[in-house]
Image (cartoon, grey):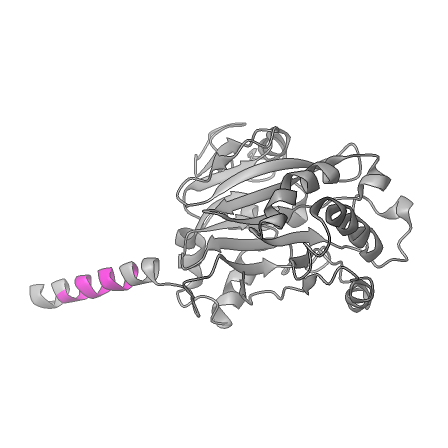
Amino acid sequence: MSTHKFINSSILFLLLVLSSCVSLPQGTDSNLAFRVVPLGVKGGVDESNLSAYMLAPGNSNSYICLDAGTLHYGISKAVSNKAFTVPASVVLKSYIKAYLISHPHLDHISGLIINSTEDSTKNIYATESCISQIKEHYFNWKSWPNFGNAGEGFTLKQYQYKVLPANATEVHIENTDMQVQAFPLSHSAPYQSTAFLIRSKDNFVLYLGDTGPDEVEKSDNLQAVWESITPLIKAKQLKAIFIEVSYPDDQPDNNLFGHLTPRWLMQEMGNLNNLSGTNAMQGLNVVITHMKPTGNSEEIIKRQLRERNSLKLNLIFPEQGEAITL
């Protein structure tokens, strides 16, 4: 190849890389608060569609990934749906700036583990107990090579562990314009999960990992979260709540295993409404996550939620690879 052709080819390659890194999302809008791309939405069985939600401020490609049960398949589906206009490898390596893991169950972290061999350097944000589980049981050279910056054996240091304080202190998410506060959740006591309150400027999104209702869990964790977000609802700054409903209403309380049903979700939303005031929650985006795809349970859950929606919430049932704007 001549020197002239080599230089031209190099410039073209550089321009393609730069354009992929700065290109804005499809259908952007100057008033957009957040953009979400679900990489996985279900609560089990289908390993190609497990909890993982990419979230970025409006008109930005600096995403965080809230849980990471499924990555590769979900990113590929999002690319095929034109939620992204760059190759899947660019989304994984360049667009995802950090992972926020609510708890270490496999359906919330297996995608991160499997894709670690192809990923780029970034941070993992989680509670101290969650990070301890990741270090001890996954990145330990027994289950998988140690891609972390701490733990057993030689540390590859691809992922930097960032412990989130348990007192809901706001923490800056590096390489993004977002902040996060972490709140404990009860996921079949004594096991814990986490809720993440994400802020971008004056806009907020609340993402809850797996959680049971306070009444069943003998806890006040959800009540504490509701009290924290009440001012944001009154000020119309909370753009969405991402919350799980794993089972239909016929699931017995003693077999919830730290999950919600439509009845329990709406009872918790009622508790939040009591704090927020009359009609404050009308039209609030509530994204339903983690439905377990057993038989026709998903359709039953959707019907039961709609029937119980006296608060007139805007119920959203996310689809894998299809972008949501907030």
Give the quadrant of the C terminus: bottom right
- Residue farthest left in this picture: 3
Q: Is residue 276 visible?
A: yes
Q: Determine whether 178 is above or below 24 in the image.
A: above
Q: Is residue 101 visible?
A: no
Give the quadrant of the N terminus: bottom left
Residue at 61% from the left image edge and 29% from the top image edge: 166
Q: Determine whether 123 is above or below 321 in the image.
A: above
Q: Is residue 159 left or right of residue 267?
A: left
- Residue 59 x %, y %: 41, 60
> Is residue 155 one of those drawn in magenta?
no
The residue segment tinted magenta is 8-17
- Residue farthest front in this picture: 278
Q: Determine whether 37 is above or below 26 in the image.
A: above
- Residue 6 x %, y %: 14, 64
Q: Is residue 276 left or right of residue 59?
A: right
> Is residue 15 one of those drawn in magenta?
yes
Would you identify the image quadrant in which residue 185 lies? Answer: top right
- Residue 83 x %, y %: 48, 67
Q: Is residue 305 or residue 141 the one in the foreground?
A: 305
